[in-house]
Image: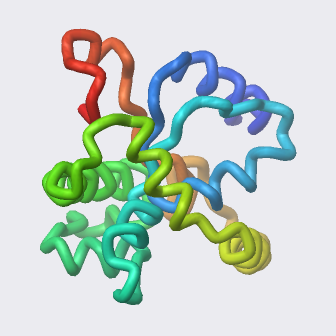
Amino acid sequence: GAPPLDIVLTRFRDFVGEAVLLAHNAAFDLLAISHKGVAFDIPVIDTLLISRALDEALDGHDLDSLAQRYDLAFPPGTRHTALGDARVTAELWLALLPRLEARGVDTLEQLLTLQANAFDRQDASALWRTQRHEKLRHSIAQKRTLNGPGSGRFTAVLSTADNRNRPPSLL
């Protein structure tokens, strides 16, 4: 069987090191794992928050809406899988970069400030409670596997090794 979640999270945290994480709706993930005793006290770029900051007047900052807005496609059967969501999140990040640069956001510090202004703790907490309830109900009805739909919410890791030769900008 698969190792327990606390062991997997510890291994993942060790693997990530001091890298910057890229995720969609990271608040959901970080809130869900915050009670597991593993600290992810590293920068996290959240495409949901970036989208919300760039397009405050628009509704629909969920991954499906943004994929449609930016003409990004999930290969069949990959939505709500770790790899499928990771790939679309990475493509979304690349689509958002020119818009960030056009606004003069070209450092990680500027980006984290921009997305912090779009973060709504109440929304994240309510979303986490709702989705956790639905996942528990669903997992009781269907025995999910570690590789099945909805199994991996962390979407992508930007390795520091991949970015060693780049300037200290947004990648």
Above or below 9: residue 67: below
Residue 141 appears in view: no
Q: Is residue 46 rendered to the left or right of residue 130? A: left
> Residue reaching furthest front?
104
Quarter containing the C terminus: top left
Depth check, front residue: 50 or 82: 50
Residue 103 visible within the image: yes
Count of all numbered marks drawn on residues in the image: 0
Q: Quadrant of residue 150?
A: bottom right
Q: Is residue 106 above or below residue 15?
A: below
Give above or below for 103 relative to 18.
below
Q: Specify whether 103 is left or right of 140.
A: left
Q: Position of residue 154 (x, y in %)?
A: 52, 47
Residue 117 placed where, x, y %? 54, 62
**Of residues 97 and 146, which is closer to you in this image?**
97
The residue that appears at 27% across and 18% down in the rendered structure is 162
Q: Residue 103 falls in which quadrant of the image?
A: bottom left
* The N terminus - image quarter: top right
At 46% from the left and 63% from the top, the residue drawn is: 49
- Location of residue 33 in the rendering, given as x and y in whole percent from the top left corner: 75, 46
Question: Where residue 5 sits: x, y (%)?
Answer: 75, 38
Quadrant assignment, res 85: bottom left
> What is the image's colouring?
rainbow
Residue at left offset 64%, top offset 61%: 28
